[in-house]
Image (cartoon, rainbow, N blue to C red):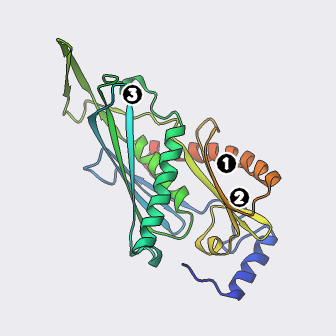
Amino acid sequence: MFAVSKAERSYLLETVETGTRLDGRSLYEYRPISLQVGVLPSASGSSRLRLGETEVLVGVKVEVGETAESSTENVHIYFTVECSGSASADFLGREAENWSSELQKALESAYSAASVFDDERLKLVPGKFCWVFKVDILVLDTGGNMLDAIGMATRTALSTTLIPRVNIQQSEGTFELEIDDNPSACDNLKVEGAPIFLTFSLIGSHFVLDPSVQEETCSRGRLSVAVDANGDICYVCSFGLLDAVELARLLTIMKKTGKVLLDRLDECVRNGNSS
């Protein structure tokens, strides 16, 4: 656990009460975001994102798998989150497992609720074959707010993912799939519906967006919400002393902020990287 002295805590709380923060940000402002795409040549899609001092690496592997006869899903997506022990003492032993499990569950909940993979090009043979996306996430360094960094890096990695073209042959009730191994015979994955997370921490009597590790230590409440490009909320997680009126106001802010942030990430992908 990151340690903050009484004097540091007092100064942090006093600063937030003035409407600013120790690093000079306003209450509802993100730290600088640095983004690279295509950083793992062997992956179907990848990204490396730095949010302040928090750094995340994401790789996506795509393959064809079997599915249940009752399933109508085009894609089964699986998340694995690993927190590097060199990033923080909190990422050792049982504590690392707890962090990984919490982050993985948030991703699974958000992506299961959002309509992410409705693209008709992803349809193979309903009830028999579907795409399997394996998303491996490594937290390289942490300076607070891992969930938002992971959410942004995951969406970016998926948006750069290439899907190979598949030729489907049917004969006597059986299906045969032939995957084109030509790298140029791929389609870009459309992920307009993929969500990102926005996290607020309650510091004193004020909420702050994108809390640093110092702010997380001094927080007495937290609200994390996943929003998609339409501003629709697909996941909410909160704990601590959160006022209902304040929550309603924050949700409005999150919808607007989420749209701006999504547009910024998509622009970064189009440009190849950003800093």
Whether residue 274 is visible: no
Q: Secondary structure at mark 3?
A: loop
Amino acid bearing label 2: Tyr
Measure the C-alpha gap from mark 3 to mark 1. 35 Å
Does residue 120 appear anywhere in the picture? yes
The quarter of the picture where the N terminus appears is: bottom right
For residue 201, side relative to residue 86 (left or right): right
Q: Nearer the viewer, mark 3 or mark 1?
A: 3
Disc 3 to disc 2, C-alpha distance: 41 Å
Give coordinates of residue 76: x percent, y percent.
Answer: 38, 37
Write down the residue under mark 2.
Answer: 28
Q: Is residue 19 above or below residue 119?
A: below
Q: Is residue 4 left or right of residue 36?
A: right
Label 1, residues with CA under 10 Å away: few <14, some 14-19, many ≥20? some
Q: Nearer the viewer, residue 81 or 240?
A: 240
* Rendered position, 77 above or below 119: below
The kind of secondary structure element at disc 1 is helix
Q: Specify the amino acid type for callout 1.
A: Thr
In the picture of the structure, the residue carrying the numbered disc 3 is 71
Q: Earlier in the sequence, mark 3 or mark 2?
A: 2
Return the x and y of residue 147 as percentages of the image width and height. Answer: 53, 58
Rendering coords of residue 44 (x, y %): 30, 44
Near mark 3 (Cα within 10 A), the count class, few <14, some 14-19 or many ≥20, is few
Give the mark nearest the N terminus, 2 or 1: 2
Sequence-first disc among 3 and 1: 3
CB under 8 Å between callouts 2 and 1?
yes
Would you place residue 22 above or below residue 181 in this image? below
Classify residue 180 as left or right of residue 1. left
Identify the amino acid type marked 3: Ser
Give the residue at x 48% y 35%. Answer: 116
Q: CA distance from mark 2 to mark 1?
A: 9 Å
- Picture disc at residue 257: 1
